[in-house]
Image (cartoon, rainbow, N blue to C red):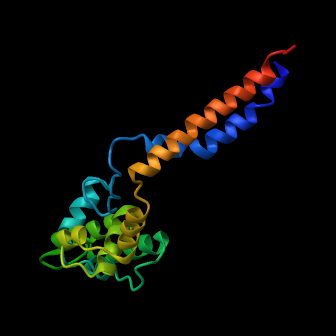
Amino acid sequence: MRRCSALLPLLALGWLVAGPSFLRSISTSPPSPRTSRTRLGASGATQTVLDALKEFDGKFEEPFELLGLDDPECPKKEIRAAFRQVARVEHPDVSDREDAEERFRRISLAYELLIDDGGRAMLLEALEKDADDLEDLEVKKNTMDEANESWDEQWVEDEFTAVSRTVFLITMAGGIGSVIWWFGFEHE
């Protein structure tokens, strides 16, 4: 049994080298395209963030303007401080404006959108892509999306590669099996 356990590292190395690619090569499904992180339903964003994004559809700078933030990359601590400062002035109980409730609702939505990492990432992506509305955000591609697609197209595996990899693995398994048989049993 001692001689067989010496071959276990070789088996593990063979699996590490060829195993995951072998599983990919025998898969019958075509490679799935990478999904954009801006897909509204699949992004994992909360309903509040999605509502806020729809509220500011096309006016993606407005959440920053409502809270008086100059830097879109500012930390959450600054966002909280800005919200508290604006809330002291714009809260419907304090403000004399006629549209104070509606304005404070929009300020609260802006805060929810900016304090959430996913919502803020979507907002920054919309600003980066210079999208006019949410539909443009889903359709427009940035350079990273194009680079990912070209990378995926470059490494599409054809049938010859899959077959040759399978033949190699079967041959390797037979060779390792022969070595295990030779060293695993006593010969005269």
- Residue furthest out toward the right: 188
Q: Is 128 situated above or below 168?
A: below
Q: Quadrant of residue 27?
A: top left
- Residue at image x 26%, y 77%? 60
Nearer-the-camera pick, 41 or 101: 41
Q: Is 68 situated above or below 163?
A: below
Residue 145 place in picture, x, y as percent: 36, 70
Residue 71 in the figure: left or right of residue 48 = right
Residue 26 place in picture, x, y as percent: 42, 40
- Residue at image x 33%, y 57%? 33
Check the picture and name the quadrant holding the C terminus. Answer: top right
Check the picture and name the quadrant holding the N terminus. Answer: top right
Residue 185 in the figure: left or right of residue 64 = right
Residue 57 place in picture, x, y as percent: 18, 72
Nearer-the-camera pick, 173 or 63: 173
Nearer-the-camera pick, 59 or 28: 28
- Residue at image x 44%, y 60%? 155
Q: Quadrant of residue 87?
A: bottom left
Kindly tell me whether residue 92 is visible in this rendering: no
Q: Quadrant of residue 129?
A: bottom left
Nearer-the-camera pick, 59 or 93: 59
Kindly tell me whether residue 69 is visible in this rendering: yes
- Residue at image x 48%, y 73%? 75
- Residue furthest out toward the left: 98
Residue 166 place in picture, x, y as percent: 50, 40
How many numbered marks have been drawn onto this rendered protein structure?
0
- Residue furthest out toward the bottom: 70
